[in-house]
Amino acid sequence: MTERAKFSGRIGFILAAAGSAVGLGNIWRFPYLAGKNGGASFLLIYLLFIAFICFPIMTAEIAIGRKAGLNAYGSYKKIGSGSWGSVGILGIIIGILVLSFYNVVAGWAFGYFIEIVFSDLLSVKDYGTHFAHYVADPSDNLFFSMGFMILTALIVSQGIQKGIEVANKIMMPGLYILLIALIVYSLTLPGAMKGVEFYLIPDITEITRHTFLDGVRQAFFSLSLGMGALLTYGSYLHKDQNIVSSAAIITLADTMVAFLAGLMVFPLVFSAGQSPAEGPPLVFMILPKIFQDMGPILGRIVGGSFFLMLCFAALTSTISMLEVPTAYLVDEKKLPRKKTVWTLATVVFIMGLPSLLSQGTKGFDMLNKLSFYHGRDFMTFISDLADMGLTLSGFLLCIFVTYRWKLFNMHEELAIGSPGYMSSGLHHFINFSIRIICPIAMGILFTMLMLEKFFGLDNIF
Ligand code: TRP
C-alpha cells in the first residue's frame, strides 16, 4: 500500500483547492466570455450555474475522493466497481488535454511578465497588433511555456504540500489586493461607469443559447470540476474535516476572483473605447495599455505584479492538473513519483505544441484553420473538446452518485466532520441538485455543445 500524504489541515486543503480553482480561467477567460456574451446577463447565468450545479457537484467530487482515498480512476473503481473507473479515466484525459493548452497561455502570461519588467512592453504602440505577433512567434513562447511546465513539474515532483501551501498563502492574498487596487483605479477613469453598467445591469434580451453554453463550461472549468482534481485533493483530506463548508469557501473564493476580474476589466475596456467582445486576447490587449498610462515606473511595478500574480494563479492550477495523472500512475501502477512527473510533463508539453503553433504561426496554416473544425484553430478545438468532456464527466458523476454509490452514502460521507449536516436544508438542496437538476442540465448542455461545436447548431435550429 502506498503511503498516502495528507494536507496539514483544513486551511492547507482549502488553499490548495482554491489555488487549483483560481487561475487563468478567472482572470483571463471569464472576462472575455462575459464580454462576448453581454456582460451582466452572462454573470447572472454564471452565478446560477455556480450555485445550483457546480457547488453540489464539488461536494460530491470531494466526497468521492475522501471516501475512497485514491486517485480519480481508483476512487470510482473502488466505490463503483466494474467499469465505473472509466469515468475517472475520462477526467484524467480531459485534465491532460486542458493542461496542454493551459500551459501555453500560462507561458504568454510568463512572457508578458518578463517583457513588462525587463523589456519594452510599456512602449508598445498598439497592443492588439503586438499580442497577435507575440502569440504567432513561437521562439519566445516555446521557451516560456517550457519554463512554465518545468516549474510545475519541479513543484509536483516534490510532493504537493509544502510548496503549494506556502505559495498559496502568499500569492492568494496578494492577488486579491492587486485586483482591488486595480478596480479602484479603473473605476476612476472617465467612461468607467459604462463598463460597470454593462457588467452589472443585465439585459434579459441578451440571454441566448450561447450564454448558457459558455456559462456552464466556464463555471465547470473555473471550479476545476470534472477532471478528478478536487477528487484527488479530497483523497488527501482528513476525515474530521468539513467538506460542505470547505466547498462553499472554495466556491466563494473562486467566484469572487472571477467577479472582481470582470469589475476590473470592463471599466477599463469601456473607458478606452474598446469592444468588450474581443475574445481571448482581451486581457492581454487591454491591461498593458493601462499600465502604460501609469508611466514607466509605476507601470512596471503594477503591471509586473499583475502578470506575476497571473503566473502564480496559473501555477497553482497547473500543479493540480499535473497531480491528477501523477496520482493515478503512482497509485495504480506503482510508478516512482519523480520519474512519473517528469515523463508526464514532457508528454503534455509536446501535446501542447500544436496549440502553441495554432495562433497565427507562419507555415502552420493547417493548425490555424482546421478544415474539419469549421476553420477554427487547434487551441480552440482542444479547449472545446475538453469543455465538452467536462460536461459529460459532470453528468456521469451525478449518475454515479445517484444510482451506483447512492445518495445516502454520499450524505453519510458529507456528514462526517459536519455534525448538523443531515438535519440541515443543505442536505436536501444537494440531494435534489445531484439527483435531478444536475443530470438534466448537464445532459442537455452536453448534447447542445456537441451539436453546436461539431454539427453547427445554427444550421439545425
Ligand atoms: N480552474 C482553473 C482555472 O480557472 C482551470 C482548471 C480547470 C483546473 N480544471 C482544472 C485547474 C483542474 C486544476 C485542475 O484557471
Image (cartoon, grey):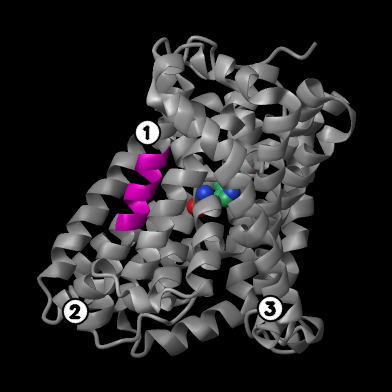
Q: Position of residue 170 (x, y in %)?
A: 34, 36
Number of other residues with Cα within 10 Å of mark 3, as a class: few under 14, some 14 to 19, many 20 or more: many
What residue range appears in magenta? 251-259
Q: Position of residue 232 (x, y in %)?
A: 64, 30
Q: Earlier in the sequence, mark 3 or mark 2?
A: 2
Mark 2 element type: helix
Residue indicated by mark 1: 249
Q: Marks 2 and 1: CB-CB under 8 Å?
A: no
**Residue 337 belongs to magenta span:** no
Amino acid at pointer 3:
Ser
Residue drawn 42% across the image and 36% down it: 250
**Residue 336 seen anywhere in this rendered image of the structure:** no
The numbered mark at residue 370 is: none
Residue drawn 72% across the image and 47% down it: 345
Left or right for 173, reference 25: left
Q: Position of residue 255 (x, y in %)?
A: 37, 49
CA distance for labels 2 and 1: 31 Å
Mark 1 element type: helix
| Residue 152 falls in image quadrant | top right
